[in-house]
Image (cartoon, rainbow, N blue to C red):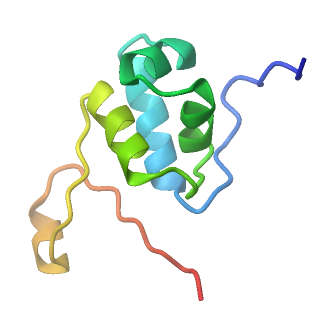
Amino acid sequence: MSAPRRRHDPPRGPLVGLAELAASRRRLLGLTQRAAAELANVGISSIYALEDGSDRLTLEILMRILDALGLALVVAPPAMLPTATQVVILNDQRP
């Protein structure tokens, strides 16, 4: 059995902004990681991965989690971003 996950470990992966937004929203809704996983119909490891900022989730799994949290993924031209009220800009810095 693995050691329990420490509460509020800071995200480490490349999607830190998304990780922080998702974790904050989950807590705002009063959901545990397990409850969020059940609501999204995904494994709890997917919630851990998202909240750690991992880029290893499939788009399908990510969309299930975001939907369960009442969030949406929007793709828009950069010119439209300044007009959005809440934006997490993801910059892929891979070579």
In the picture shown, does residue 45 fall above or below 20?
Answer: above
Closer to us: 19 or 57? 57
Residue positioned 53% across, 42% down in the render = 50
In the image, 18: left or right of 46? left
Q: Position of residue 73 (x, y in %)?
A: 25, 51
Instruction: Report the number of discs.
Output: 0
Please tell me which residue is depicted at 56% across the width and 36% down the height of the picture.
46
Relative to 29, 79 lies left or right? left
Q: The C terminus is located in which quarter?
A: bottom right
Residue 72, by quadrant, is top left
Q: Nearer the viewer, residue 35 or 81?
A: 35
Closest to the observer: 54 or 79? 54
Q: Name the image quarter holding residue 1.
A: top right
Residue 89 spot, x, y in % from top left: 35, 64
Q: Is 90 above or below relative to 42?
A: below
Q: With respect to residue 51, does 58 lie above or below? A: below
Q: Position of residue 59 (x, y in %)?
A: 38, 52
Q: Is residue 88 left or right of residue 92?
A: left
Name the residue rendered at 56%, 26% in the picture. Answer: 43
In the rendered image, residue 84, in percent from the top left (x then y), is placed at 13, 57
The residue shown at (36%, 46%) is 60
Instruction: Give the vertical position of 64 relative to 56 (above or below).
Output: above
